[in-house]
Image (spheres, rainbow, N blue to C red):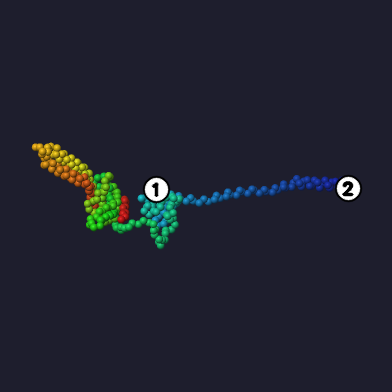
Amino acid sequence: MTLGGRIGQSGAIAGILAFAYCSSAFADPPVQKATPAPAAPSAAPAAPSVAPAVPPDIVVMKDGSMVRGVILEKKVRDFVQLQTASGEVRKITMADVTYAGTAASMPTTASTDAPPSPTAAPDADRTRPFVTIHAEQARLRLTANQPQVTFSVKTGEAQARLYGYRSALSAASFTSICTAPCEATLPAGTHEFALSVPGHGPALTDAAVTIPAGGHELRGVYRSAAGTRTAGVVIAIVGILGGAALMAHAITSSEPGGSNEMNMGEFAGGGVLMALGGLTGSLMMFARDTASVTVTPASPAAVAPKGVVLSGRF
């Protein structure tokens, strides 16, 4: 190859290199691939749902229904106040309740399900009175002429008769009502009452009392014979000792076979005094306390509907 040809070839190569350099200098910068953003962390797993706590107390009604909640106040003979899970406060009369307390302590006999079927057999073990009285109620306010007087009502009587004798021995049983002043409810009708004070047995009233239905005041008068019994003891002692002294004096003052004979009048007088004193004193010592009861109508405000309800068994 000639020198000119070589020079031309070198120039062509140099031009190609220069063009490639310029193209790389003015070319657009390389585009970087966008890096995807990291995925947002997934939401925290939902907490497991917690079932609402079961109220600790329960009230079971006589009709078989049930109320759950928290007992706020309970009066055994009056009412029970319960706060339900919804916040409602209910006041339920104890007369309609068969059980009120903690659910854990509820007896198995108190059913929390539906009321029993009307065809269910009656409870054979339930104690029933021999006689059931169906009568209107008499609401009474009992008062007395002195403090600590207890009213009782006659609920039974037993008699014992010997074969061949007409007379019989009888004994009455009484049920205590309350100590006056107090309130009670009795079946309307005719009753026999007795009054008593501490340390003494009941004194039967002189007559039965008829109490109509409605509100009434039962006024009792208790008359103690303690003074009479004390006087009887004194009379018996004085009569016996005085009579014995007169008889002894009549005997000791006499001289057998002498001029001073026994004074029969003094001796007889001593005997009479001893007999009369002992007999009179004995009768007075066994004097019994007496009582009486009267019934008067009372205003509705004077006799409250609540009180003691007496249920007698004969």
| Residue at position x 37%, y 49% in the image | 75
Residue tagged by mark 2?
Answer: 5
Q: Seen from this angle, which residue lies furthest right?
A: 2
- Front one among 266 and 292: 266
* Image spot of residue 88 (x, y percent): 42, 51
- Front one among 246 and 296: 246
| Residue at position x 40%, y 55% in the image | 61
Decide if residue 279 is in sight here. Answer: yes
Q: Seen from this angle, which residue lies furthest front?
A: 257
Q: Report, in whole angstroms, how far the alpha carbon at label 2 lies from the one at label 1.
A: 124 Å
* Image spot of residue 111 (x, y percent): 43, 56
Labels in figure, total: 2
- Front one among 137 and 133: 133
* Of callouts 2 and 1, the N-terminal one: 2
Quarter holding the C terminus is bottom left
Residue tagged by mark 1?
Answer: 73
